[in-house]
Image (tube, rainbow, N blue to C red):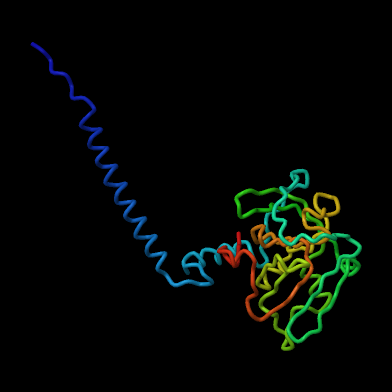
């Protein structure tokens, strides 16, 4: 008497395949509906409000009094050269100046000697480029907040802060805008040293901005002007389709 062979795995495989196909199809439809819903939401600063809400939540976790992670100095490395827009011909450190202004004020010009009077800060943080690469770097300089407070900048006549501040290179070819709280974050520096040596011209010397809460596109090199404002200022990469806030 012959014994019938047990059924092979084909029926089970077919059932699993059909089940997986149905589940995958439902997931795809759900994803499409979710994306369609997201794309049709009202926008805040050019970004659908649910995404902006996530960015603001992240900013609360890391922004304000929160600090970006710091690392041992021996983890710092050489940073990739990137972004020559606005690089001046003359980057003589001794000749460096920065002009600060705000509504209703006469422009004021500051020199390296003005920075030298302020407390020095050194921090080793991760610089993140919006292109996807990152590098741990040791930065040296002074807090922008210390510079602003020491020189009576940034406040209106009623004592309130101007909500925005912009920065530009000497030829104004490159310019960024920030909200004032981000600019005055304790890890936002006017930086003149990198990895223990004077900041090179290629990396933005004599003085550049370093802001740990933002992508590299906000870390303007060859800093020449600082302007407080009551309306949101122009931003080089925001005008080319990137998020104005560029927050991490």
Q: Which residue is drawn at the image coordinates 23% and 37% (left, top)?
A: 15
Vertical placement of residue 208 versus 5, above or below: below
- Where in the figure is residue 156, as x and y percent of width and height? 73, 85
Q: Quadrant of the C terminus?
A: bottom right
Q: Which residue is drawn at the image coordinates 85% and 69% (left, top)?
A: 97
State the residue in front, 222 or 110. 222
Q: Quadrant of the N terminus?
A: top left
Q: Given the current orientation, which residue lies at the most extreme left position? A: 1
Q: Given the current orientation, which residue lies at the most extreme top position? A: 1
What is the quadrant of residue 30 in the picture? bottom left
Residue 60 visible somewhere in the drawing: no
All told, the count of numbered labels is 0
Residue 62 visible somewhere in the drawing: yes
Q: Given the current orientation, which residue lies at the most extreme front position? A: 89
- Where in the figure is residue 143, as x and y percent of width and height? 79, 65
Vertical placement of residue 229 versus 135, above or below: below
What is the quadrant of residue 11 in the picture? top left
- Where in the figure is residue 195, as x and y percent of width and height? 80, 49
Q: Given the current orientation, which residue lies at the most extreme bottom position? A: 158
Please state if 241 lies on the left or on the right of 211 as rendered: left
State the residue in front, 74 or 235. 235
Vertical placement of residue 74 versus 220, above or below: above
Vertical placement of residue 91 versus 45, above or below: above
Please state if 162 lies on the left or on the right of 109 as rendered: left
């Amino acid at each position: 008497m012959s014994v019938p062979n047990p059924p092979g795995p084909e029926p089970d495989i077919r059932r699993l395949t059909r089940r997986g196909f149905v589940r995958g199809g439902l997931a795809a439809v759900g994803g499409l509906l979710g994306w369609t819903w997201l794309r049709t939401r009202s926008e805040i600063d050019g970004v659908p409000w649910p995404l902006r809400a996530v960015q603001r939540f992240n900013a609360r976790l890391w922004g304000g009094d929160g600090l970006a992670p710091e690392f041992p100095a021996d983890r710092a490395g050489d940073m990739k050269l990137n972004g020559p827009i606005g690089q001046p011909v003359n980057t003589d450190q001794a000749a460096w100046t920065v002009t600060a202004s705000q509504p209703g004020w006469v422009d004021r010009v500051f020199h390296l000697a003005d920075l030298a009077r302020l407390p020095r800060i050194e921090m080793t943080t991760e610089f993140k480029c919006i292109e996807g690469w990152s590098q741990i770097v040791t930065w040296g300089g002074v807090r922008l907040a210390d510079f602003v407070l020491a020189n009576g900048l940034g406040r209106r006549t009623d004592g309130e802060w101007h909500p925005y501040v912009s920065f530009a290179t000497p030829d104004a070819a490159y310019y960024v805008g920030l909200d004032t709280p981000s600019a005055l974050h304790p890890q936002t520096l006017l930086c003149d040293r990198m990895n223990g040596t004077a900041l090179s011209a290629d990396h933005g010397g004599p003085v550049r901005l370093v802001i740990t809460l933002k992508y590299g596109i906000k870390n303007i090199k060859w800093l020449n002007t600082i302007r407080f404002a009551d309306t949101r200022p122009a931003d080089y990469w925001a005008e080319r389709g990137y998020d104005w806030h560029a927050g991490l």
